[in-house]
Image (cartoon, rainbow, N blue to C red):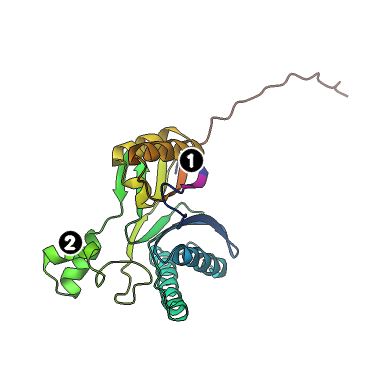
Amino acid sequence: MTPYKLEAGTAQHIGSRPQQNDRAAIFTGARAPGYMLAVLSDGILGGASASEQVLHTAKLAFDQFKPGDNPSTDRLAMLLREIVLETHMIIKMNAFTTEEEAHSSFVGLIITPQGKAVWAHVGDSRLYHFVKSECKSRTNDAEYIDHLVSTDCLPLEAAKSHRHSKLLVNVLGNPRKEPFTTIGSLEQVSAGDTFLLCTDGLWHFFTDAELGAVTSKATPRQASEMLINKAIERAHGKGDNCTMAIIKFVKLPKEVKNYVVQKMGRAV
């Protein structure tokens, strides 16, 4: 394993919307030293209430998490699924009280002290994994479409148009449909790996190559500033809320040996 240091940060811009409904945060676990959880959510319906609930539930669950020795990918994936399902249930319960539906997307990424990465995804927010500037993988709707075809017996074309149907849209808080969670993992991160979690207010304006180039060459803060400014420019005054979390694994600088000449003591 190549030694690395971790650089991370979150950023957002309201875009041309009247309010900011996206949320993003990076947590450390109260009972899981060395573990990190990055969470991002886009409040699609009902303002920011659903995305706020995502962060609240994620923090509570992560603070209760006791990993033990090197937990498996399945166990970490189960934690992310539990966050999704518990948040979904709470959002639906709140809707009965407020008489107003609230929906949100979800992206979560866990990094372990051993360098394992596990992520989960629901909805139209995305997670990208870059090695240097090359996009090695990103979340998409392919597994959800397969799920609709195989489980709900929908024709392929109907499944592909699920975003246009309230009965099929994949979000947290939808009373008509349980959320479908897609899981991904990387067994060992290395120096040069970067993860980008972002809402559609960002990724809609960039190619994978553009995102990889910016995140690989700059610090998370510098990269987020450049991406937000360019997204605003390309939106031409019609941009959505724009939110991201960037996690970079950077090669440690070479140790510079510093030799100091000192006067020797007299031998006795």
Q: Secondary structure at mark 2?
A: helix
User: Which residues are drawn in magenta?
Assistant: 8-13
The amino acid pointed to by label 2 is Lys
Residue 157 rendering spot, x and y as whole percentages: 12, 63
Residue 230 rendering spot, x and y as whole percentages: 38, 36
User: Is residue 180 or residue 95 the one in the foreground?
Assistant: 95
Is the magenta region chiefly helix, strand or loop?
strand
Residue 10 is covered by the magenta coloring: yes
Judge from the rendering whether residue 32 lies leftward or rightward of residue 124; answer left or right. right
Judge from the rendering whether residue 67 lies leftward or rightward of residue 179; answer left or right. right
Q: CA distance from mark 1 to mark 2?
A: 34 Å
Report if residue 192 is visible in the image.
Answer: no
- 88 is higher (above) or lower (below) than 96: above
The amino acid pointed to by label 1 is Pro
Residue 211 rendering spot, x and y as whole percentages: 35, 39
Q: How many numbered tags mark residues here?
A: 2
Q: Secondary structure at mark 1?
A: helix
Residue 254 rendering spot, x and y as whole percentages: 54, 30
Report if residue 77 is visible in the image.
Answer: yes
Which dot marks residue 160? 2
Q: Quadrant of the N terminus?
A: top left
| Image quadrant assignment for residue 267 | top right
Q: Quadrant of the C terminus?
A: top right
- 106 is higher (above) or lower (below) than 88: above
- Residue at 39% in and 40% down: 232
Which dot marks residue 220? 1
User: Is residue 236 or residue 176 the one in the foreground?
Assistant: 236
Question: Mark 1 vs mark 2: which is more N-terminal?
Answer: 2
Neighbourhood count class around disc 2 (C-alpha, 10 Å): few under 14, some 14–19, many 20 upward: some
